[in-house]
Amino acid sequence: MRRLALLLALSLCATLLGCLPDLRSLEPPRLDYLPAASGLLRLDPPGVGAGEAVFALAFEVYNPNPYRLRLERLEAEVLIGEVSPAPAARSALTGGALVGALGRERLALELRLPLLPDSPVLSELNALLSGEALDLRLEGFPVLAFGQLEQALSPRTLLATRLRGPFLPEPPRLALEPGSGLREASAESAVYELVLRAENPGPIGYRWRAEALELRLAGEPVAALPSFAADLPAGSSALLRIPFELPRAALATLEPAAPGQNGLSLSLLGGVDLELPGLRVLELPVGVLVSGRLE
C-alpha cells in the first residue's frame, strides 16, 4: 500500500508539473498604472476612527504569454516620499487577477497605511493635504500562481507616481435630533441636553472641537458651554449629546408646544476647529452651527 501511495503521489506531481508552462520562456506580465482610478480614498488621523490612510491603486495587467496567468499578489515595500511607513503595509497589497492568454485585466488594490502619532509619514501626508505632490513608490515583485505552486518574479519598481491634493476636510452636517430635554434639575439650575446628529460626508476624518458655545431660545441666549469635542471619522455619522446648564428662570421657556402650534425656536452658535491630530487644524468662522424648533 505504501508503494502504491508513493507511485500515485509521484504520478500526480508529474501531471501537475506537465501542466505548468516553461518558466524559462515566461514573459512577466506588464502593470500599467491607471491614475484616473487611483488616489486617496480615506484618511483618519491618529486617534480618530481606524487611524489609517487608505489609497486606491488601479492597474491594467497585460499578459504577453500564449497561456493564461494568475497574478496572485504583489509583494512590495511602500515608500511615501523617502519614508517606508510600516511593514504592515505589505499585507494591504494582497489581491490578484486571472489574465487570459495575450489578454488584459483590471487589478484594483487598496493600500492601507496605519497612522501612529509618531509616524514619519505624517509630514508627507500633511504636504498632500496642503496641495503638494506626494511621491508614492512600490518596490517589489509580482507573485504568480500555477495551481498550488507559486513563482516570484524578479524584483522591480512596480509603481512610481505622484499623487496630488489638496484634500480638505468637510465640515459636518448638523441637525437637531429627537431626545433633547432636561436631565437634571435643582433649585437654582437644570441641565439641558441638546442632541444633534453630526455627519462627516468627506474622506477626511477629524476631531470636531467647538468653542464658546451659546444656546439661544427664541433668539435669547440662555446658556453657554466653554468647549465640546467629538471624533468624526471619514464618512461617519454620530449622535452628539451636548449638556448645557440653564438658570431656573429659563426653564419656563422649555415647555413643549401645544398641539397645532410651532415649537420654540432654538439655535446653537460657536466657533469650530476641525483638528487632524498629528497633521493640522482647520479653523472655521464663528457662526450659527444649527437651528430649528423644539417640538
Image (cartoon, helix red, strand yellow):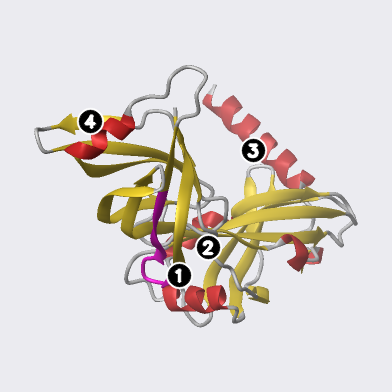
The mark total stands at 4
Q: Position of residue 41 (x, y in %)?
A: 60, 57
Q: Does residue 24 appear to the left or right of 121 in the view shown?
A: right
Frontmost residue, 28 versus 14:
28
Name the amino acid, label 3.
Answer: Leu
Q: Which residue is mark 1?
A: 282
Q: Position of residue 110 (x, y in %)?
A: 60, 55
Instruction: In the rendered structure, find residue 183 and report the number of the disc placed on it.
Output: 4
Which residue is at 41% across, 47% downward? Answer: 219
Q: Secondary structure at mark 4?
A: strand
**Residue furthest left in the image:** 187
Q: Which portion, as a residue range, is magenta?
A: 268-283
Which residue is at 74% across, 39% downward? Answer: 15
How far apart, in angstroms, are the residues tagged by discs 4 and 3?
77 Å
- N-terminal label among 3 and 2: 3
Q: Which residue is mark 3?
A: 10
Quarter occupied by the N terminus: top right
Frontmost residue, 264 versus 215:
264
Q: Which residue is mark 2?
A: 169
Q: Is residue 129 magenta?
A: no
Asked if the residue at tag 3 contacts the one at tag 1, i.e. Cβ–Cβ closer than 8 Å, the answer is: no
